[in-house]
Image (spheres, rainbow, N blue to C red):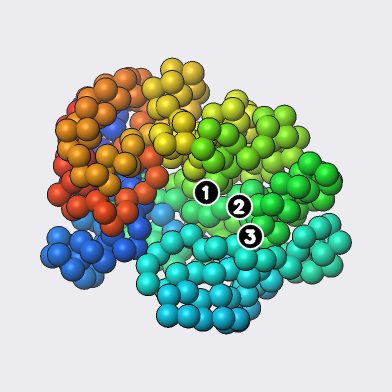
Amino acid sequence: MKEMSGKERISRILELKPVDRIGLYEHFWGDTRKKWTSEGHIKAEEDLSEHFKFDILGCGAFNCKADPDFKNEVVEETEETILERDGNGALLRRHKLHNATPEHVDFMVKDRVLWEEKVKPMLQATRNRIIFQAYSDARKLAEKKGQFFCWCGVNVFELMHPVCGHEYMLLGMACDPDWVKDMVETYSDLLINLMEILFAESGKPDGIWYYEDMGFKQRPFMSPEMYKEIIFPGHKKTIDYAHSLGIPVIMHSCGFVEPLLPGMVEAGIDCLQVIEVKAGMDLLRIKKNFGDKIALCGGMDARNLVANDTKAIDKELDEKIKVVMKGSGYILHSDHSIPDQCEYETYRHFVDKGLSLGTY
């Protein structure tokens, strides 16, 4: 089979159609790029997507905070951290010296009353929520390079917890589910309305990439029944909208989300990413049970990359690639993202070995 462009390859992979090779994409910590640049592996102005010839290019374009124009207020600052209040009224502590997930300190919204009073009225699909230029530039760049272009952003689960925190959101799901259902409906409508504005003015993407971290180690954040009752309607609505435009949907979820997968598949996802090994996810098991329904992206243990253990990397690639490439439907990616402990040569080896094994 002749060599395909990234756009052709990913489009066909998401449809489980024959391709020339498996797909390739990756996420990196910001500190990883800094390290590899300082070591001379990456040029200062060079894009990692271009350097490794990834098949996908993504762009985030929405600001869905309650107040999109709010400038973060500094509440407290030390040499290493900064505590800020954001446009959702949430207090988050961030590290200044390295990239890391912020610490959730406190939230303005803790129940239905505060949601209805402080946040819901502000969630209107206004133009100041959309970063038109960045989206348009990225779309044109992907087209020029022959890459599959994704609008990237979060769906309802990842839109709710920045407002009220995981604790209050999950308590709400158990004790006041109608409140959380209202948040799901509000945010799903907001996403669709913003997409209608953006796509009409700047053109449709090739795909939509939703980040939706619904699990932790060995457990999802909710039961399959609770997912189906509360979260599923928002997923179904937003995915149905994408499909109505002929746009496939890739959904990312860290953690153990396998019990939720039947519902996610019913909601219409075309591809599951990231399939986190250390959380209990098993790429081969998921391929066996769901590989005829959805494409898969990830499932390669990032701990081997962090350890720079090329023998372990080779063993895993040998065991998994030959299985997941059957019938098409696989995109090579780590099971999380690449931290700065991973050496450039290690990641280069991972890519070269993986694509060698994954060529049809």
Q: Name the quadrant of the N terminus.
A: top left
Q: Give me the residue at 33% from left, 35% from top.
A: 300
x, y percent for residue 262? 60, 25
x, y percent for residue 270? 50, 34
Packing grade of label 1 (10 A; few <14, some 14-19, many >=20) is: many
The reply to whether the C-beta atoms of the residues labelled 2 and 3 are less than 8 Å apart is yes
Q: Give me the residue at 32% from left, 42% from top.
A: 302
Residue 163, above or below 326:
below
In space, the residues marked 3 and 1 are separated at their CA atoms by 13 Å
Between 136 and 72, the one lying in front of the other is 72
Secondary structure, mark 2, is helix
Picture disc at residue 179: none
Packing grade of label 2 (10 A; few <14, some 14-19, many >=20) is: some
x, y percent for residue 209? 49, 47
Picture disc at residue 162: 3
Q: Give me the residue at 48% from left, 54% from top.
A: 151
Which residue is identified by label 2? 158
Residue 119, above or below 6:
below
The reply to whether the C-beta atoms of the residues labelled 2 and 1 are less than 8 Å apart is yes
Whether residue 11 is visible: no
Which residue is identified by label 1? 211
Q: Nearer the viewer, mark 3 or mark 1?
A: 3
Q: Earlier in the sequence, mark 3 or mark 1?
A: 3
Name which residue type carries label 1. Tyr
